[in-house]
Image (tube, rainbow, N blue to C red):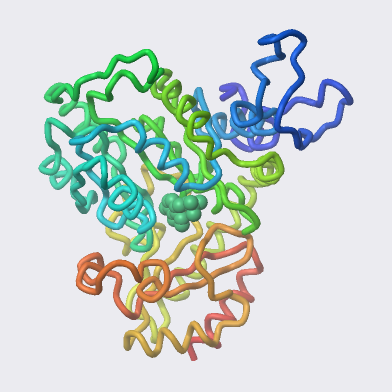
Amino acid sequence: MNEALRFATNCIHAGQTPDPTTGAIMTPVYMTSTFVQASPGVFKDGYDYARSKNPTRAALEANLAALEGAAHGFAFSSGLAAMDCILHQFRTGDHVVLSDDVYGGSFRQLDKVFRHLAIETTRVDMTNLGHVERAMRPTTRAVWLETPSNPMLKVIDIAGVRRIADDWAKKATPSGGVRAAALGPLGEAIDAPILVVDSTFASPCLQNPLSQGAHVVLHSCTKYIGGHSDLVAGALMTSDSGLAARIKFVQNAVGAVPGAMDCFLMLRSTKTLHVRMQRHCENAMQIAQWLERHMKVERVIYPGLPSHPQHDLAKRQMRAFGGMISVVIRGGLEPSRAMLERVKLFSLAESLGGVESLIEHPAIMTHSSIPPDARAALGIADGLVRLSVGIEDVADLIADLDQALR
Ligand SMILES: Cc1ncc(COP(=O)(O)O)c(C=O)c1O
């Protein structure tokens, strides 16, 4: 990041200079798959083939790196493609400690797609650091957490988890580097736990996990970074040059990169990230406070409320509390279903982080793949409803929720 410039300025300018050929102020959409070479192997600035490098993507990656205060940024075709890039770094027998309510799709990838690698996993409630400490093993190669989490909005102490990972780095069992030149940067095994923070719910505007000890930050850019519910994309940011080389290698070798148009849309979106996030947070705080007083509501979960179990940690770790609220409606499934059918302004849909407000029922929608007893253990009750508060006028949003609850 340009340390001299503040976040809002970096949102608009980082990674972007006027187009050198025309002076166009906006980064052009470089719709090209290849680049002409002057002589075999002689090409400009690393541009030989667009899977490896594309100028629109390069501008986006520099912009995203700046927003996370990272030395390196990498864009992917989805949040799960970004996760896939990290999981390719591990070997058979490696162990990963996961936060318990990690996004279902993330768990499915580790559990099903990478099953052949027999990566061992332990899921724990990381709001208690003692659980993380007890889950660690000499073979642990990653601690993977989401904060705030989905849908219970748990806030996890990133710096505290990093201290535990560092203690265990000394006890790590070497997993046997392949050291084959043909494997490129992947030839060396990862021999100590890395801390991966999925910061999708916060966006780079509300917290920067690298500054608190994360080795890698992951975003589903489909959410706040894209911000307009019109694209699917992901990103990884790191300041560790060894990890960056490994990520770059897999990004190119596997090839799950976003197209130039999606990169352009993200660059356009990050220009307003700071103002969008400010309104998301203001609206969500007002709605959370209003819901907490509502007689049809049993419980409101929002990190900005003093009633949230990690409210003090959220105040230390985050700049503001985000646009996501989870709420338990009194009476369980039927009253919550009725409410979801009656909303008019909130759209009943999965996903989150767009300018328009969305509402969903985790037990039936986003988290239905989790067995009922496991859902109950996580606190995903049948009356739980998740709101992604948009940037509409908050009075209209409250009026809509009020009529739906009544
Ligand atoms: C916290 C979190 N991480 C990762 C993902 C996966 O991102 P994508 O849908 O862009 O692949 C999601 C998707 O909902 C998510 O909520």
Q: In this view, does 7 lie above or below 221?
A: above
Figure label count: 0
Above or below: residue 303 compared with residue 126? below
- Residue that appears at 43% across and 18% down: 241
Q: Which of 305 and 50 is in front in this view?
A: 50
Residue 70 sits above or below residue 85 on the image? above
Q: In the rendered image, which quarter is residue 167 located in? A: top left
> Residue at the location (62% across, 59% down)?
229
Q: Nearer the viewer, residue 22 or 95?
A: 95
Left or right: where does residue 55 sit relative to residue 233?
Answer: right
Drawn side of residue 177 relative to residue 33, left or right: left
**Residue 388, horizontal then vertical, whole percent:** 51, 65
Residue furthest to the right in view is 22
Whether residue 27 is visible: yes
State the image quarter where residue 171 is shown. top left
The answer to which image quadrant residue 198 occupies is top left
* Image location of residue 355, percent across then percent down: 63, 60
Could you tell me residue 383's position as x and y percent?
34, 80
**Could you tell me if residue 321 is visible in this image?**
no
